[in-house]
Amino acid sequence: MGRYFEEFNTGDVIESPSRVVTTEDIDAFVRLTGDNNRLHTDDAFAQSQGFPRRIAHGALVLSVATGLAWQTGILEDTTRAFRGITDWKFTLPVHPGDAIRIRGTITELKAYPRMKSGAVAIGLTVMNDAGQTVCTGSLSMLMAMRPAV
């Protein structure tokens, strides 16, 4: 069971296990989205553009990051809605075979008692296996309040 809104505190930190982004992940994302930019599909082309090999889509990395946040367990069964993403910035590419993980800090809480919910903003940093930041941004979730007893 995840955390109820009342169980979050500004400054709380969450960390996820790491997950390897694979060639198969990138290929599946190409099929799913139709974004077949050769930076994502062709090592030789990516090298001609200054990358050592092809790169993962930024949106794929963001999607994996949200999945990693889910895997921490704090959102399970208490999330009512995904409210939004703000200030997302990509700082380094992610290549097939790179492991990424998240570190999140609770940055803002806003109660909506009539909705029996509250908004929780999580500032996320996505890091590669070398500890380098690959992207940052903020997710906002609507979380259930603890049921009345």
Image: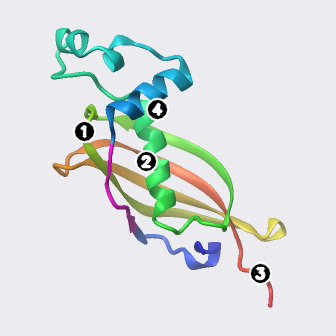
Provide the residue designation for mark 4: 59
Q: Which residue position is annotated with label 2?
A: 65
Q: Earlier in the sequence, mark 2 or mark 1?
A: 2
Q: Which type of secondary structure does the marked residue at label 1 adopt?
A: loop
Q: Residue at x 51, y 75 (%)?
A: 9
Q: Is residue 35 above or below residue 86?
A: above
Mark 3 to mark 4 CA distance (whole Å): 35 Å
Indicate left or right for 48 with 117 as reference.
Answer: left
Q: Can you name the residue that lies furthest to the bottom here?
A: 149
Q: CA distance from mark 1 to mark 3?
A: 43 Å
Please rate how many residues cluster around mark 3, counting C-alpha atoms within 10 Å: few if below 14, some from 14 to 19, many from 20: few
- Residue 113 rendering spot, x and y as whole percentages: 78, 71
- Colour convention of the picture: rainbow
Q: Which disc number belongs to residue 147?
A: 3
Give the image quarter of residue 56.
top left
Q: Mark 3 falls on what kind of element?
A: loop
Residue 18 location, quadrant: bottom left
Q: Secondary structure at mark 4?
A: helix
Foreground of the two, 121 or 131: 131
Q: Residue at x 84, y 68 (%)?
A: 114
The residue singled out by tag 1 in the image is: 97
Residue numbers of the magenta segment: 14-20
User: Which amino acid lies under the numbered mark 2 shown in the image of this protein?
Assistant: Ala
Amino acid on which disc 3 is placed:
Pro
- Quarter holding residue 68: bottom left
Say what secondary structure mark 2 lies in.
Answer: helix
Q: Nearer the viewer, residue 5 or 130?
A: 130
Q: What residue is drawn where x is 41% and y is 63%?
A: 105
Place of residue 40 in the rendered image (x, y in percent of width and height, measured from the top left): 35, 20
| Label 4 Cα crowd, 10 Å radius (few <14 / some 14-19 / many 20+) | few
